[in-house]
Image: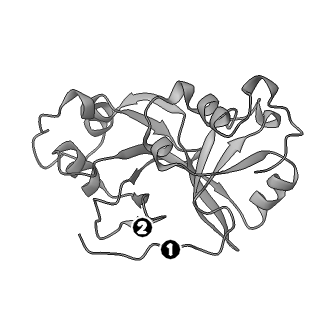
């Protein structure tokens, strides 16, 4: 694999986790964890990493044109049954793959030393054929903010910021991820109130 320098970016939230505060409890983002991939003067974008869509990787490739020109490969259960995440409410029919550094395609974007982003059908074919990244989180859709929007939401205390743990990005136990992240940060979920400060 060609060695690529990862981008640190100028945004203070790039490569961080945004953890939904209780004030978002009635929105799409209730109890979500977002991994921020980009943050600059044009806005921000990232992916919810703990909200499954109720579909598997097999469902995804079967319902799309990933293998229209070739036969569907035999996939191990661990690959075929991997859950597809709900990355956010924007572009919900488009697939994105957050993955480990052992895969690097032409369109791969390095987010950090250990998390990369690819959004081509080629990476889906590679995963299905057992030639993809060792670790990955596949999502449909992403979460986006316009210029200054995320900063405003931070001032409104909508999000808690935490250092991103790559293991949690790729962890497929979505049901307990939010609570585990809070506990790891020393926060008791039952005591997580709206006026909680920022890390």
**Measuring 47% from the left and 37% from the top, which residue is drawn there?**
85
Q: Is residue 98 left or right of residue 164?
A: left
**Measuring 70% from the left and 74% from the top, which residue is drawn there?**
41
Asked if the residues shown at circle 2 and circle 1 are in contact, with their CB atoms under 8 angstroms apart, the answer is yes
Q: Position of residue 56 (x, y in %)?
A: 35, 30
What's the CA distance linking mark 2 and mark 1? Answer: 9 Å
Say which label, 2 or 1, has the lower sequence index: 1
**Measuring 80% from the left and 31% from the top, which residue is drawn there?**
192
Q: Is residue 61 above or below residue 176?
A: below
Q: Which mark is residue 109?
A: 2
Q: Position of residue 76 (x, y in %)?
A: 18, 31
**Measuring 43% from the left and 33% from the top, which residue is drawn there?**
172
Q: Position of residue 68 (x, y in %)?
A: 18, 46
Find disc 1 in the rendering and name its residue: 7
Q: Position of residue 92 (x, y in %)?
A: 51, 45
Q: Which secondary structure, mark 1?
A: loop
- Between 122 and 186, the residue placed more toward the observer is 186
Task: Specify few, some or many for label 1: CA neighbours under 10 Å numbering under 14, 14-19, or 20 or more.
Answer: some
Q: How is the image coloured?
A: one colour
């Amino acid at each position: 694999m060609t060695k690529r320098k990862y981008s640190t970016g100028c945004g203070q939230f790039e490569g961080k986790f945004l953890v939904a505060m209780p004030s978002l409890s009635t929105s799409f983002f209730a109890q979500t964890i977002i991994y921020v991939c980009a943050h600059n003067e044009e806005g921000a974008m990232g992916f919810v990493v703990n909200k499954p869509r109720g579909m598997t990787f097999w469902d995804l490739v079967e319902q799309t044109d990933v293998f229209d020109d070739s036969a569907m490969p035999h996939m191990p259960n661990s690959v075929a049954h991997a859950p597809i995440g709900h990355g956010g409410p924007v572009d919900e029919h488009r697939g994105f793959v957050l993955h480990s550094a052992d895969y690097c395609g032409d369109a791969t974007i390095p987010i950090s030393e250990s998390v990369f982003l690819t959004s081509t059908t080629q990476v889906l074919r590679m995963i299905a054929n057992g030639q993809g990244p060792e670790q990955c989180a596949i999502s449909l859709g992403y979460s986006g903010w316009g210029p200054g929007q995320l900063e405003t939401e931070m001032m409104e205390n909508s999000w808690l910021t935490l250092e991103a743990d790559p293991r949690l990005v790729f962890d497929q136990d979505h049901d307990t991820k939010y609570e585990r992240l809070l506990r790891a940060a020393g926060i008791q979920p039952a005591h997580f109130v709206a006026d909680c400060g920022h890390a």
